[in-house]
Structure formats: structure tokens, C-alpha cells
Amino acid sequence: FLHGASDGWTLALDALAAGDEFTVQAHELGQAMGDVHLALASAFPVGAPGENGRTAAAMTERLTAAAHCVPALQPFVPGLRAAFAALSTCDWGPPAQRIHGDLHLGQVLRAGRDWFVIDFEGEPSRPLAERRSAHSPVRDIAGMLRSFDYAARQRRPWRPEWARRCREAFCAGYAARAGWDPRKKHGLLRAYETDRAVYEVLYEARHRPDWLPVPMAAIERLAVRGD
């Protein structure tokens, strides 16, 4: 509990409702997340640089399973597979390390000008051993980028440009602390964001079908335009 703190999801929705930007807060959140990743890397063992080929294969398997359950995914499978295939040819990736594992705006609190990251247990649906193992920090970054997109699509008209500016600001803040810029690793970031969107499609189809258009819009963007 932090006295006077508000969660990032509420703050983002309040900004949208007021017609305000959220880029300053997003930049500072990116800085905070860069600091968190550096702290985790110093406190827990760090693995070798990401094994992109193995990761791409696992992502492709998850896509195949999701498309079997959610027919709306099927027209986009070739484009999504291409995103994962591009990851397998990437010759760089940050070392695997302990990460948050389920990062989104609801998992951060803001008190004054400071951000605090909470709930490090990872995705509840994943086995505990997997949640405790090392992963690419790009997975956390992709989770937060998707969360900005969710916030921007909570009410009509959707605000994709608001989300894009928040995404840019978050990545810039992260780069200022972490020493590398996610925006300059487009293939890497696209693959992890695609994997997250596939997970979201499956989740929404099962639990909140009214929300399915939100991740499906991202699926179309990532599969067709690749941005």
C-alpha cells in the first residue's frame, strides 16, 4: 500500500477522458522499468543472450494452438508466422533474466512523480517454474506497449495515435536507463508484441468476448503492416 498512489490503468483512462496526453508519465514509467530490469539482472543470475530460434518456435506453437481455438485469427496466421520467422534470424537479443512476467498498466503505481512496479508473480496461467525462470526483458516491454493500446481503445472513438505516442515515450524512457533502445530492435519487439497479442486474443475469446476487437486490431496491424 502506498498512500496517495494511483494505478497506471486508472491514470491513463483519466488522461484519456480529459483529453490529456500521457507521454510524460509514460516516459518516466519507461525509465522506472529500465531501472527495475537492471536491478533484477544484478540480483538474480543472468542467462545467455536470447535464443531467438527456440523462442520463435515456441511462439509459433502458441499461435497454431490459438488459431485452432479462435477462427478469427486464421486469416492472419501467415503474417504472424512471418513475424516469428524474422525473430529466428535476429542476431541479437538482451540476455535472459528474471523479469516481471505480466507487465501492464494495472501492475504499476504512481505516487507523486515516482512509479512503483508491483505483483511480480508473473502470468497466473503459466507454471511456477516457468515464471521463475529467465526470459527476455523484451517480453515485459511488449506487455506494457499492449497495455497502452488497451487503454486507448476503452471508449469510442478509439485513440490509436495517443497509444502510439505513449509507446514511443515509454521506449525512449526505457532506453535512457537500460542502455539499448527497443525501437531499434524492430524484429525483436514485433515478435514479442505479436506473441502477447495472440495470448490476448485467446484470453478475450474465452473470458471477455466483447473485448476481442482490441487485440484483433493489433493482430491486423502486426500481421499486415508489421508496425
Image: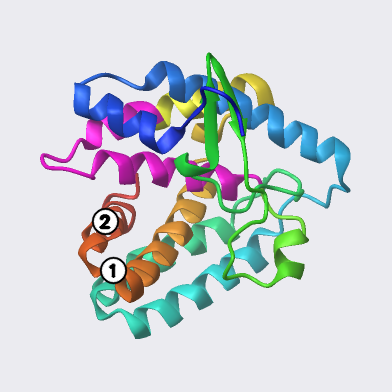
- Label ID, residue 76: 1
- Residue at 19%, 22% (x, y): give it: 19
Return the residue nearer the eye: 202 or 2.
Answer: 2
- Label ID, residue 224: 2
Q: Name the image quarter holding residue 199.
A: bottom left
Residue 217, x across and y down, in percent: 24, 55
Residue 180 visible here = no
Q: Amino acid at mark 1?
A: Phe
Q: Earlier in the sequence, mark 1 or mark 2?
A: 1
Magenta stretch: residue 153 in it? yes
- Distance from disc 1 to disc 2, alpha carbons, whole Å, reads 8 Å
Q: Amino acid at mark 2?
A: Val
- Residue at 35%, 22% (x, y): give it: 22
Please give the range of residues in magenta: 137-166
Q: Name the image quarter holding residue 114.
A: top right
State the SS at label 2.
Answer: helix
Residue 165, x across and y down, in percent: 33, 26
- Residue at 60%, 28% (x, y): give it: 2
Residue 60, x across and y down, in percent: 50, 72
* Residues marked 1 and 2 touching at CB (< 8 Å): yes
Q: Main secondary structure of the magenta part?
A: helix
In this rendering, is residue 214 above or below 207? above
In this rendering, is residue 179 above or below 122? above
In this rendering, is residue 144 above or below 191? above
